[in-house]
Amino acid sequence: MFVGWADSDLWMVPARLQTFFNGIVASVHPYSWSWVGNPMHWLRFDPQLLGGMGFMWGSSPSDERSAIELRMDESSHRARLKEHRAAVNINLTARRRESFVMAQGSFSAFGLAAVGALLGFVKHADEARAFLQPAVRADLPTASHGKCTLPTDVGMGWLTTHAFNASARIRFVQLVNLLELFVWPSSRFNINHSVAVHLANAKHGNFDETLGYYDALVRLPRTAVTSSAKSGSVAQVAPLVPPRYTCAPTRWLHAATSTWLECVNVAQCDMWQPVLPGANVSLDRWLPAPARMVCEQLLHSRRVAQDQHEQT
């Protein structure tokens, strides 16, 4: 069982979501300790702004250098650059102890056992209570009315990173942006791999007709789709390709995630058969960069394994 949330402008089909989670259960063990989402990263949490400071798409030395200068943060953050530098330049160990990962807020989920551990941390840990009960600030009027002032995905990222510290082997099941977790507007929608579509009701764009077409395809019984296709009224069958995950230690710099595993879907790599040692595989240009990297790494590992086998 998984527990999660989605933005109100997210398109998904329950049956497709079930296939997706069944794929995680089948190939990620123990699946119940999974955190599912599209990872993003921060250098630190600012208690005055009640938000992350030092945004990073990935977690690498180059991204970290950019985050120290707040190059990808909004302008209101960059106005506090001097203060931010003072907070993160104390030493490398302290900086990486404060940095954390989050799952982009449009769609995220936790395995049930992970939910239990996360709730236990929130209930019993002093640092969690201090994080969730910041001092009331005059310039944040909602704080005095008993409303949550923390950004949901950033706050959940901080809590999860601290709850599952370096002693836990949590599996972060990555959604590849523009493939599994798709963001409009773009022409790169892949019905056979997309689990959810964010910004389905985006301003200046009406995607109801397009998404409705795909929605009908995945909802129709296979017999109805087959008969409709024969009559020419339906052009294709649109089943979700069940994900198949491979997991490896994360290469993130956060101290708390040093024992975590990052799990990526390699099922999309089957679109370029045969993916065999020595094969001349060409990846289509439309494939998102994270997915290309996954497939290239998979191809490389298979070639290395074949070379080692031939040597023995």
Image (cartoon, grey):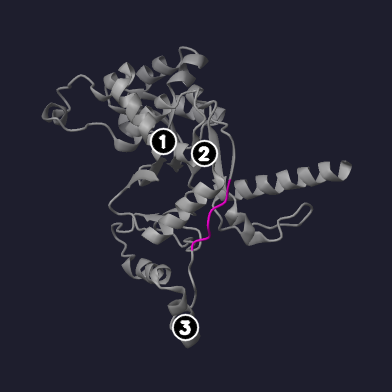
Tell me which segment is drawn in magenta: 240-245
Specify whether residue 268 is in view: yes
Q: Residues within 10 Å of mark 2 (few under 14, many from 20)?
A: some
Query: Which residue is rendered at x = 59% and y = 57% of the image?
Result: 285
How far apart marks 2 and 3 lie (CA) works out to 40 Å
Q: Nearer the viewer, mark 2 or mark 3?
A: 2
In the rendered image, residue 13 lying in the magenta stretch gets the answer no
Q: Give the mark nearest the N terminus, 3 or 1.
A: 1
Quarter of the figure that contains the C terminus: top right
Give the residue type that dot 3 points to: Ser
Residue located beneath label 1 in the image: 113
Query: Which residue is rendered at x = 11% and y = 30% of the image?
Result: 145
Helix, strand or loop at mark 2: loop
How far apart marks 2 and 1 lie (CA) works out to 10 Å
Give the residue type that dot 1 points to: Ala
Q: Is 151 placed above or below 218 here?
A: above
Residue located beneath label 3 in the image: 227
Specify whether residue 79 is in view: no
Residue 222 rendering spot, x and y as whole percentages: 46, 74
Query: Which residue is rendered at x = 23% and y = 21% of the image?
Result: 134
Query: Which residue is rendered at x = 40% and y = 73% of the image?
Result: 220
Task: Check residue 30 in the rendering and tell me which mark sits there, or answer none.
Answer: 2
Residue 215 rendering spot, x and y as whole percentages: 38, 67
